[in-house]
Amino acid sequence: MEYRDLLEQLIRAHGPSGDEEDVCQVIQRNVPATVDEVTVDVMGNLIVHQKGNGPKVMLAAHMDSVGIIVTHIEKNGFLRFGALGGLEPKAIYQAPVRFRNGVGGVIAVNENKAEKEFKLTDLYLDIGAADETEARNLVAVGDTAVFAAPILKNGTRLISPCLDNRAGCVALLAVMQQVKNPVNDLYFVFTAQEEVGLRGAKPVSWSLEPDYALVVDVTCPDDVPGALHEGTTAVGKGTAIKVMDHSMIAHLAMVAQLSRLADEIGITVQKDLLKVGGTDAGAVHVSRSGVLTGGVSIPCRYTHTPTELIDQTDLEACVELIRAFCESELVRR
Amino acid sequence: MLKLTRQLCAISGVSSREDAVRDFIADTLLPFASDMRTDPMGNLIVFKEGRKHTGNKLLLDAHMDEVGIMVSGYTKDGCLRFSFVGGVDRRVVLGKRVYIGTERILGIFGMKPVHLSTKEERKSIPKLESLYIDIGAKDETEARTLVKLGEVGVFDGESLLFGNGLLKSKAIDDRAGCAAMIKLAQEELAMDCNFVFSTQEEVGTRGAFASSFSVKPEIALMMEATTAADLPGTPGGKRVCAPGSGVVIPYMDGGIIYDRKLFEQLRCLAEEHHIPWQTKEYISGGTNGRVYQRSCGGVRVAGLAVATRYLHAPTSVAAVSDLGSMLRLARLFIDRIAEED
């Protein structure tokens, strides 16, 4: 199937917030030779420029994933850690993780803690080290790790860690390959440190000063048993046009434009409204004197766990919609 | 370095009222600065030319402000209601002294005496609303004439040396950083340095929003004091760092993941030059670094800090040896950055 190899490569690359070098390199290797310029800024954002005569459009997907960072090594060889991004202690308990150097570990919890009492500080990381010395030979305080779980496939459904937001990165790489003669001046930005507070997107949108921005990220669907109706999307029902979340209200002109384009190319779309969570769009739309910003979302269940779930057809539809946007006539602002 | 730190700690400079600290630093550095200006936020920006002319490339930041209180009301019997300026633990002020306004009116943090409090009240920490400051006024009218609404108060925290090379004082956060930067600015430096003595860090890293855009550095080094929790009964993983174990080189705190390469550079420099160092073994706190990092098109940010117990209390405690380690490592860092390209 299309995109799948690339997605798997990106999922396996190390790239928690603030430590995105490996995933950045994998993306760079997959950038087509037809682009005009590739740069990495001081925050670690990867910027791919594909020149066009139209308005400046920034297309953004964050390349960092959630992860953990070692804060302390105990005498008995167990590790304490901090969260990189929003981690729910109950959901990551017993998750397998992998460090950049390949060292593996499992997240465990102090004995005698009832599940409802779990706090991040009750969790520890077991890398099987016999004592502090052995542990220090394997990892150092400040080292990062990500979820290391298998990539499972059932038809078009994928279950894997890091789909948030390597799925979005794949979408941008696919668009880059498909847009041959861009009408608009395109900047594909793979941002750093989104999971810790949209930190990469802020400076890069300041530098680029785009006229338009389109952010692609996963969204929390509302299609699971007992869902609280904090969202509106369902997995497998098409890509979703962002209307609002906790970080941004999408510009109405962008919502209208994307809806019109979806009609034109004949794809089914959903509307994405989310009471919680946010994306890089939150930082981009208030950059400088404001940027006309919209979002395209891929519904993803169980985000920030080792077992995130998406439907590949949603990802493919997302690519089509973004490509249509890149090739559409935009008013110069 | 110790004498200078103690001099700086003694000055009052609650967030937004940093004037006295700024005047002291400006006077001290006047003979050494190549250029000096105060911006609208009150940040004092001292430019010092070095052997290599690098302009705005390197910025160093230490904040001048300290935590304290702000007067928010009066009681009928002449006491003051107040809010904290910056993050202060209510438990640490009870029975302590505070000096309010430029007139330095003495006040005492008071609360209901023990025989009037209920069993329940004695078990919990009193709410801010039940605390007051007693300035000895006979009634509300007298209190109003002595102290104006909105006046700030500073903790009385005389500096003392005690124990095995420890310094106790108010405002070690961040006069320790200011002292190190003053020392550096008085030396001949390997490259141009922009020293920012910033304001309003304690209320949300506010001064840095202005200085980051006016200086537009490529690299920013935070010179800070950070919380140490090496206290009896605290497990290793929550101790953060400890006074006397060397300068703190952080890789992450509540507001920033520091530039990984600069973090490693600092770590190597400390090892090479046998400067005692430690890192934060728990993620907590925040610095102006979070603002610099994401200003303009992005800035590479590194940090150094002095491990300080009881950080936002009238009696914070740091090790004298760590002050020296921070200064030495900062100097080496400047040298190393100057050698690049």
Image (spheres, rainbow, N blue to C red):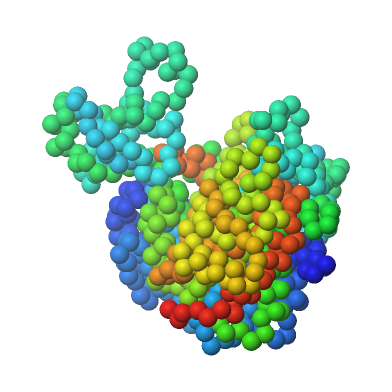
Q: How many marks?
A: 0
Residue B283's place in the image compared with B63, above or below, is above
Q: Residue at x 58, y 48 (%)?
A: A231
Quarter of the image where one finds residue A91? top right
Q: Nearer the viewer, residue A53 or B272?
A: A53
Q: Residue at x 50, y 66 (%)?
A: A256
Q: Nearer the viewer, residue B200 or A167?
A: A167
Give the image location of residue A152, x and y in percent. 84, 54
Q: Residue at x 45, y 15 (%)?
A: B120
Q: Nearer the viewer, residue A218 or A221?
A: A221
Residue A48's place in the image compared with B179, above or below, is below
Q: Answer whether residue B284 is visible to the viewer in this image.
A: no
Q: Residue at x 58, y 43 (%)?
A: A229
Q: Nearer the viewer, residue B296 or A318?
A: A318
In the rendered view, does A309 fall on the left or right side of B254?
A: right
In the rendered image, the quadrant that contains the C terminus of chain B is bottom right
Quarter of the image where one finds residue B64? bottom left
Give the image location of residue A118, x and y in percent. 67, 34
In the rendered view, does A58 fall on the left or right side of B7?
A: right
In the rendered view, does A201 fall on the left or right side of B161?
A: right
Give the image location of residue A287, x and y in percent. 46, 67
Give the image location of residue A258, x and y in percent. 55, 68
Residue A210's place in the image compared with A126, above or below, is below
Q: Answer whether residue B98 is visible to the viewer in this image.
A: yes
